[in-house]
Image: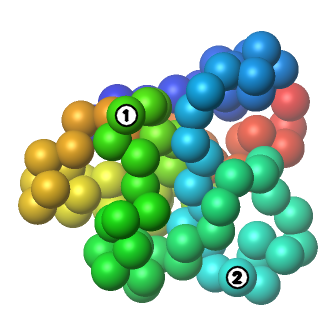
Amino acid sequence: MKFISPIELSEKLRDKEDIQLIDVRESYEFEDGSIGGINIPLDEMMTSVDRISTSKDVIIYCRSGNRSAAIIYMLEKKLKLNNLYNLERGYTAYLEL
């Protein structure tokens, strides 16, 4: 599994790099605050794979990095995706920047 640090993500967003950002937290968590991107709650990810880009880096995050790690593992194993990155320590760490 590939990881991206909060600082690296911040730099990509600042530089307006062409990435896809997916928040797998529940809708109410996303509404309380997010880094951006789209919200696909964890339990909907496997039925929403058509919304995941295969042509650019995809950064998936949750609150702490655990849920995003689990879904990345499943997506890589079942769909053979190799463009997925887990945000280290998740949304919580990103807020500490």
Which residue has dot 2 on it? 27
Q: Position of residue 67 (x, y in %)?
A: 45, 65
Q: Quadrant of residue 63?
A: bottom right
Residue 25 falls left or right of residue 53: right
For badge 1, the amino acid type reads Ser
- Residue 79 quadrant: bottom left
Q: Is residue 81 above or below residue 23?
A: above
Q: Nearer the viewer, residue 92 or 78?
A: 78
Vertical comparison of 60 with 2: above or below: below
Q: Taking 53 as reference, is 15 left or right?
A: right
Q: Residue 54 placed where, x, y %?
A: 33, 42
Separation of residues labelled 2 and 1 (CA atoms): 26 Å
Q: Locate the C terminus and report the quarter of the image it occupies.
A: top right
For residue 32, which quarter of the picture? bottom right
Local packing at callout 1 (Cα closer than 10 Å; few below 14, some 14-19, many 20+) is: few
Residue tagged 1: 55
Give coordinates of residue 39: x percent, y percent: 64, 68
Q: Is label 2 in a helix, a strand or a loop?
A: helix
